[in-house]
Image (cartoon, rainbow, N blue to C red):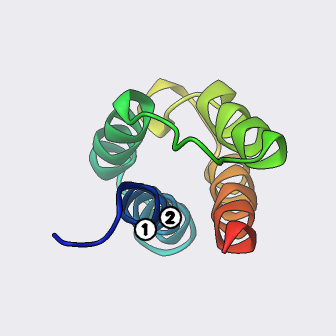
Amino acid sequence: MKWPDEPRKTFLLGSLMAQVAYNAAVLKDANEDAGFRRTIAILPAWAGMSAKTRAAITALQRVPYAEKGGKWEDINAAATAATLGIVGER
């Protein structure tokens, strides 16, 4: 991809967050929840990420995975907040 590093990371992380929120609201697939959230956990932040967005991502990471008893409503709320934080970065 020829995009600069920061917009590329922003797009990737935002897409994954939106997928986690969609899964929690519609699909409710525990395997998908775990897979996407494990991927998010290993992605690095971009240099210009705001403290508010970092906090929203950290809040999602603190919600247990669905397979570990996390509630879909909590996962959706945290992933939606993180997605909106990322969108607000641009």
Q: Which residue is mark 2?
A: 14
Indicate the position of residue 35 as horizontal and vertical percent values: 28, 41
Quarter assignment of residue 16: bottom left
Residue pictured at 36% horizontal, 28% vertical: 42
Please, what is the three-letter code of the amino acid marked with disc 1? Answer: Phe
Find disc 1 in the rendering and name its residue: 11
Question: Of residues 55 and 50, which is closer to you in this image?
Answer: 50
Q: Is residue 27 left or right of residue 69?
A: left
Vertically, is 13 above or below 23? Answer: above
56 or 31: nearer the eye? 56
Most distant residue in the left direction? 1
* Whether residue 66 is situated above or below residue 80 in the rendered picture: above
Q: Amino acid at mark 2?
A: Gly
Q: Is residue 44 found left or right of 57 in the rendered image?
A: left
At a point 52% along the width and 38% down the height, the residue shown is: 45
* Residue occupying the point 61% across, 52% down: 72
Whether residues under marks 2 and 1 lie with C-beta atoms below 8 angstroms apart, the answer is: yes
* SS at circle 2: helix
Residue drawn at the location 35% of the way across and 64% of the way down: 4
Toward which corner of the image does residue 31 lie, by quadrant? top left
Q: Dot 1: few (<14), some (14–19), or many (≥20) neighbours within 10 Å?
A: some
Task: Point out the image quarter for the C terminus.
Answer: bottom right
